[in-house]
Image (cartoon, grey):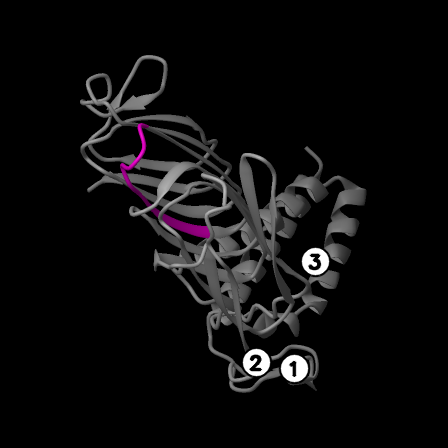
Amino acid sequence: MKLDRIMWGIVLLFIGGVLLLENFHIIDFYWRNVWRFWPIFLIIAGVNILFNRNKSQIGGIVSIAILVVTLGVLFYKGQQAPESKRWADVNIEDSVDFDNNDTEHLSFSHPFTDSVSTKTVLNVSGGGTSFDLKGSTDSLITADVEKRGGTFSLQTEKTDSITTVNFKMKGNSKWNMGDGGNDVKMKLNIKPTWEIHMNMGAGEVNFDLSQYKVRAFNFDGGAAALDIKIGELLPITDVNVKTGVADVKIKIPSNSGCRIKTKTGLSSKDFTGFTKLEDGTYETPNYKASAKKIFINLDGGLSSFEVNRY
């Protein structure tokens, strides 16, 4: 294998590992601390070119060793809290907003009327945002937003049998390392049967769906933290989660039967109270006998999946 491919592989593993540790809140990494060391990579590139031209095995080992030591130093420096808000000798406030008080409070709602369809679809999208859903409302939906960036919109449309609610965030969210981005607190009406679709990049989702009639919950996210609680108000509930690098926690009622199918590369799995079957699926002991069932499909590249019964 060529030396340059090995070195690029090491760099990508380093960046991915740091991002993963950050996402799981194991470390706090300040990228601006390591930015001033960028000339080191020019030196490493020069050494790589020299040794690669001579095709020296010893030279290749030396190049890799220099890179590993350099990344080790950067890993150490990156965890030290910066003394000032300066990036490359320029006040970082000129380009990135670190003022948590620079927020705008917004409120969205749509009334609940008899004309609202029994089946209601909720589409939520946005990155760099923390979503919380808990409690009920007399309206169809309410959303209180602390906005630090981007634009939010709430739109509804109705066909003969389905009401669709679209809650979207667009633009830059000014997601600050360690400080978070936009905060959204939502409430839904408990009367309709809900089908929820979420599409987001980085962010956090904490949904307590136990008091809602949720027919389906679909989540498609990148580097996210997802924590949801499912209820048992319908005979069947489908939960589909597709992630990149994420921390996923799902709580299900112990009285409901549950089956889990996974497609999870290097992800970790913790399914307490489930039995693994020969086909690779997982089931609760009461799956066949239970009148109410929950079907969970998990698809993740490098994530942590945890399903618990309450």
272 part of magenta stretch: no
* Residue found farthest to the front: 114
Q: Which residue does the numbered mark 3 point to in the structure image?
A: 44
Mark 1 and mark 2 residues within 8 Å of each other at the beta carbon = yes
Instruction: Give the foreground label among 1 and 2.
Output: 2
Q: Which residue does the numbered mark 1 point to in the structure image?
A: 92
Mark 2 and mark 3 residues within 8 Å of each other at the beta carbon = no
Q: What label sits on residue 98 in the rendered view?
A: 2
Density class for disc 3 (Cα within 10 Å; few <14, some 14-19, many ≥20) is some
229 part of magenta stretch: yes
Inspect the image, locate mark 3, and give the three-letter code of the amino acid beneath it.
Ile
N-term-proximal mark, 3 vs 1: 3
N-term-proximal mark, 1 vs 2: 1
Residue drawn where x is 35% and y is 49% of the image: 190
**On the rendered image, what quadrant is the N terminus found in?**
top right
Find the distance from the CA under tag 1 to the CA under tag 2. 8 Å
Find the distance from the CA under tag 3 to the CA under tag 1. 28 Å
Find the distance from the CA under tag 2 to the CA under tag 3. 33 Å
Inspect the image, locate mark 1, and give the three-letter code of the amino acid beneath it.
Ile
Secondary structure category for the residue under label 3: helix
Q: Is residue 308 left or right of residue 89?
A: left
Q: What range of the chain is rendered magenta?
A: 225-235
